[in-house]
């Protein structure tokens, strides 16, 4: 998490508008996928604040279902949007959002 806290500053220094993070794996030793949502939401909220302070948008990237089914809370766009809304509900100037990588 320390490197993530520095990331918005680093991104701002480079002049980029956003930082995208891949999140959503289960906590070590956990068998409960729902534990993951808290593990994503709380750090994402902190990262959002760090990004907001330097005017950098934060993107949450979902993990591909073929690799992580049953091991991540972010495998569907709806999961991603739920986490973003949990961090920043009803915002007119959002600093966190879903990131889709299409290859």
Image (cartoon, rainbow, N blue to C red):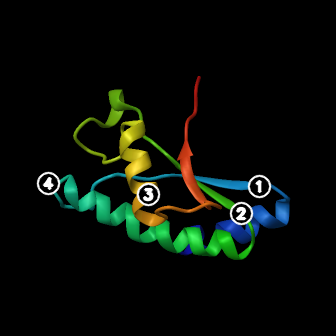
Mark 1 vs mark 3: which is more N-terminal? 1
Q: Which quadrant holds residue 95?
A: bottom right
Tell me what residue is drawn at x 45 percent, y 42 percent: 62
What secondary structure is found at the residue carrying circle 1?
loop
Mark 3 closeness class: few <14, some 14–19, many ≥20 residues within 10 Å: some
**Residue 85 marker:** 3
**Residue 51, image x, y percentages:** 66, 69
Residue 49 in the figure: left or right of residue 17:
left
Camera-near label (2 vs 3) is 3
- State how far apart marks 2 and 3 are (Cα): 18 Å
Proximity of marks 1 and 3: CB atoms separated by less than 8 Å: no
The crowding category of the residue bearing disc 1, from other C-alpha atoms within 10 Å (few below 14, some 14 to 19, many at least 20), is some
Provide the residue designation for mark 4.
31
Element under label 4?
A: loop
From the image, state whether disc 3 or disc 4 is nearer to you: 3
The residue carrying mark 1 is 17
Q: CA distance from mark 1 to mark 4?
A: 36 Å
Q: Give the position of the C terminus as an image quadrant.
A: top right
| Image location (x, y in percent) of residue 93 | 65, 61
């Amino acid at each position: 998490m320390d490197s993530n806290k520095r990331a918005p500053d680093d991104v701002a220094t480079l002049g980029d508008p956003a930082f995208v993070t891949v999140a959503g794996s289960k906590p070590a030793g956990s068998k409960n996928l729902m534990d993951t949502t808290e593990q994503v939401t709380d750090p994402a909220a902190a990262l959002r604040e760090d990004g907001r302070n330097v005017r950098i948008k934060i993107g949450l990237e979902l993990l591909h279902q073929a690799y992580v089914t049953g091991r991540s809370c972010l495998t569907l766009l709806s999961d991603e949007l739920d986490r973003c809304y949990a961090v920043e509900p009803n915002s007119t100037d959002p600093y966190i959002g879903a990131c889709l990588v299409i290859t």
